[in-house]
């Protein structure tokens, strides 16, 4: 007798378009055992416990289409696989990853379901699915369940595996432009686009950010000299070798001064507003510990602003204020820092955070500030006493709309002088609303690879709905990499699916496109080809091989063979294609392990190849297969039929409606467009593989003469 339990039989991450959706999903085969006989409305208290633990499920509309729709289904009675779907989605959302798509479908075996949930990352999706199972079982068995801990576990997976918030900001903007995204490593290196039209970003560094410009920006003295040569105001200063020369330089420049490392970032080793010899000498030691030399420069009074420049545009500006803690008469300075500063969600220990946590043991500059106030880390400030921790560095307000146009131009000029395409330009001025020329203002630093997070409000989770400013920043970076007048990073992709001679078609098509002058990447059953190079002889009908083609920067066009099993078990390697070819609806017997048992179910799988055809693309379909003829209506773009018999009813109807077809007529290839016919005279009678190849090439716009020459050349080999 089956138990009342939920078991996972298998879990598969579908990385590309599949029977479920265009986007990656986690598919779980779930056996609910005896719970098949116990829908949700038959379990006392189940509904109440579920709502008590996850009240936000009220937002799930489910199939009813209105707020509270899912909970209505639970109250009326639904199966636990369906409940699991919604719970797993909600746990991801509560952990900070917004997801919406989910489905639960019965299989042919009673009590076994396929549950699919949207998952930006496999590990995060698995964590949510497992926690969801535990929560549902606890609700069924009336056991306690720690929802807060479950959400925290999923959140840790997000922190460990998902893109950082800055990169996610850019990726979301790419999605808005329908630019394909490929993650290239486990951190934040991302490919935008495919093949030769791709661009790469790492947080806010792009492939256009040269290492020379990065090195210049890291060298504060060189940066100052370059900026000064172009008339950009910078604080005068000099590089010093020891504490004695630091003090002499400070006297020559005029007190107060700033002492900082020649190279560095995030304000490490920088000490401001120094007016006595003791403090200057102490600050020299702090800056010198960072290595690469020490600089003494004039201290510029005013407020610090951080201006984000992307290309030829000022995208964001933030006001930076001093960092303070307020005493309560009970806690030490160190405890106050932990409670009042490090609790800021923008502070952390890696590149996902725009601000660093302040750890006193690692912050000699902070310790010096405390010493200047006759305090130590163990001091207990009186209630209400404000203690200065850092004189600058805490971003507190967005002031983008207040920046004077002249100041914006100066910031953009500073980035261009250094050679950075994206940069944070730190300036000090009394008022950002007035031109710098009218006040004592100066550019104090440029940062390559800035963190857009500095300009965003603090949030928990990487995919919270983005603020308007965040959307503008992401959009500016994407528009910088892919000007809106150009293509969105997409190379033409030819997807070929079916069982009949798909490899032959793929290889014929790749050869024909190479003859037309394109650099072609081919993934097929015979292996992986880049141009004429056979780089891998193993079967390349898999997601990883398709991704290898699309990652290759030397490829103008991709030809990728797939089949129903690939769609079911991995998903397509591309999100959309220019030409989608389906040769047949055979092969049902090979899919029983995937619970595909009827021709109708197989067609639902194969239609994925048609669903991903772009609106300006073409589906190439075998008109001899009635199911494929019916599938033509699912294509967002045009359809070209191919057939060995020009008299097929499907061909006649299609051409009568102004459509296109490639058929065999009297042993020759005929290109039919409405009532217009172009004949390609070839030496040999064309078979279906040749007709499919010709149709795909014609769909892409290859010249008919070149098609005929290419086909004859292939037949002669």
Image (cartoon, grey):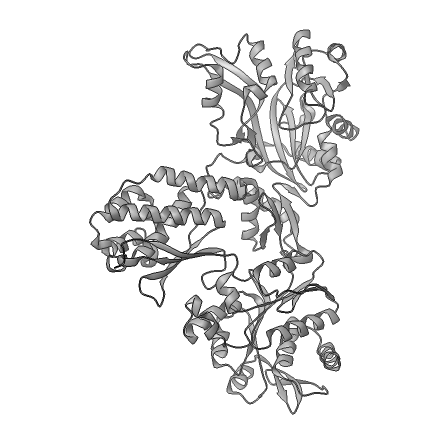
Q: Which residue is at the front of the view, 679 or 495?
A: 495
Q: Position of residue 717 (x, y in %)?
A: 75, 79
Point 54% across, 81% down: residue: 623
Question: In this picture, is 252 found above or below 129?
Answer: above
Report the number of numbered marks: 0
Q: Residue furthest bottom?
A: 666
Q: Which residue is at the front of the view, 513 or 44?
A: 44
Q: Is residue 487 visible?
A: no
Q: Position of residue 182 (x, y in %)?
A: 59, 52
Q: Residue furthest front?
A: 1
Using residue 144 as the reference point, say whether residue 668 is left or right of it. Answer: right
Q: Position of residue 25 (x, y in %)?
A: 46, 55
Question: In this picture, is 333 found above or below 204?
Answer: above
Using residue 128 as the reference point, say whether residue 529 is left or right of it. Answer: right
Q: Quadrant of residue 329?
A: top left
Q: Quadrant of residue 577?
A: bottom right
Using residue 580 as the reference point, say whether residue 32 is left or right of it. Answer: left
Q: Is residue 417 visible?
A: yes
Q: Which residue is at the front of the view, 221 or 414?
A: 221
Q: Residue furthest right?
A: 229
Q: Quadrant of residue 442?
A: top right
Quadrant in the picture for the N terminus: bottom left
Q: Position of residue 145 (x, y in %)?
A: 31, 40
């Amino acid at each position: 007798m089956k138990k009342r339990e939920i078991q996972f039989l298998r879990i598969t991450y579908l990385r590309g378009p599949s029977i479920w959706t265009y986007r990656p999903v986690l598919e779980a085969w779930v056996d609910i055992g005896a719970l098949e006989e116990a829908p949700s409305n038959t379990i006392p208290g189940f509904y109440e416990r579920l709502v008590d633990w996850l009240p936000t499920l009220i937002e799930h509309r489910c199939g009813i289409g209105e707020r509270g729709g899912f909970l209505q289904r639970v109250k009326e009675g639904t199966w636990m696989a369906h409940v699991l779907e919604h719970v797993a989605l909600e746990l991801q959302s509560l952990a900070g990853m917004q997801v919406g798509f989910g489905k639960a479908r019965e299989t042919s075996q009673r009590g076994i379901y396929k549950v699919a949930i949207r998952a930006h990352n496999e590990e995060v999706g698995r964590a949510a699915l497992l926690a969801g199972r535990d929560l549902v079982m606890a609700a069924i068995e009336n056991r306690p369940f720690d929802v807060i801990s479950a959400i925290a576990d999923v959140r840790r997976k997000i922190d460990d595996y998902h893109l950082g918030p800055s990169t996610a900001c850019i990726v979301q903007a790419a999605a808005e432009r329908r630019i394909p995204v490929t993650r290239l490593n486990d951190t934040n290196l991302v490919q935008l686009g495919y093949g030769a039209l791709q661009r790469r970003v790492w947080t806010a560094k792009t492939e256009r950010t040269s290492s020379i410009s990065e090195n210049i920006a890291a060298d504060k003295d060189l940066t100052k000299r370059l900026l000064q040569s172009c008339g950009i105001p910078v604080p005068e200063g000099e590089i010093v070798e020891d504490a004695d020369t630091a003090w002499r330089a400070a006297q020559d420049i005029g007190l107060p001064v700033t002492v900082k490392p020649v190279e560095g970032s995030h304000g490490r080793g920088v000490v401001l507003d120094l007016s006595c010899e003791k403090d200057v000498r102490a600050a020299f030691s702090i800056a010198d510990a960072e290595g690469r030399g020490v600089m003494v420069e004039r201290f510029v009074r005013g407020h610090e602003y951080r201006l984000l420049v992307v290309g030829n545009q000022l995208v964001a500006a933030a006001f930076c204020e001093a960092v303070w803690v307020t005493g309560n008469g009970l806690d030490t300075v160190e405890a106050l820092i932990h409670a009042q500063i490090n609790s800021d969600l923008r502070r952390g220990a890696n590149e996902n955070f725009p601000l660093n946590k302040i750890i006193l043991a690692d912050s000699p500059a902070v310790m010096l500030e405390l010493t200047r106030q006759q305090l130590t880390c163990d001091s207990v400030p009186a209630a209400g006493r404000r203690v200065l921790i850092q004189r600058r560095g805490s971003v507190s307000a967005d002031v983008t709309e207040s920046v004077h146009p002249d100041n914006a131009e100066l910031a953009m000029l500073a980035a261009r002088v250094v050679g950075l395409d994206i940069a944070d330009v730190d300036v000090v001025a009394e008022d950002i609303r007035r031109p710098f020329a009218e006040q004592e203002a100066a550019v104090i630093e440029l940062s390559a690879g800035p963190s857009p997070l500095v300009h965003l409000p603090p949030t928990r989770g990487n995919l919270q709905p983005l603020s308007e400013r965040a959307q503008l920043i992401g959009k500016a970076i994407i528009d910088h990499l892919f000007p809106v007048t150009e293509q969105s990073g997409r190379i033409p992709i030819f997807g070929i699916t079916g069982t009949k001679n798909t490899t032959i078609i793929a290889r014929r098509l790749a050869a024909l496109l190479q003859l037309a002058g394109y650099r072609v990447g081919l993934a097929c059953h015979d292996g992986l080809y880049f141009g004429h190079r056979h780089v891998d002889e193993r079967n390349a009908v898999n997601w990883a091989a398709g991704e290898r083609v699309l990652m290759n920067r030397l490829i103008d066009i991709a030809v990728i063979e797939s089949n129903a099993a690939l769609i079911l078990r991995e998903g397509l390697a591309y999100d959309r294609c220019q030409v989608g070819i389906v040769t047949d609806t055979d092969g049902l017997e090979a899919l029983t392990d995937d619970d595909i048992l009827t021709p109708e179910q197989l067609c639902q799988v194969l239609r994925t190849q048609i669903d991903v055809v772009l609106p300006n693309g073409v589906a190439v379909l075998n008109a001899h297969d009635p199911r494929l003829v019916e599938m033509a209506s699912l294509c967002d773009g045009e359809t070209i039929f191919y057939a060995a018999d020009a008299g097929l009813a499907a061909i006649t109807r299609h051409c009568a409606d102004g459509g296109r077809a490639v058929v065999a007529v009297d042993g020759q290839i005929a290109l039919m467009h409405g009532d217009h016919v172009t004949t390609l005279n070839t030496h040999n009678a064309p078979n279906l593989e040749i007709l499919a190849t010709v149709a795909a090439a014609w769909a892409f716009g290859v010249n008919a003469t070149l098609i005929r020459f290419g086909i004859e050349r292939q037949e002669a080999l």
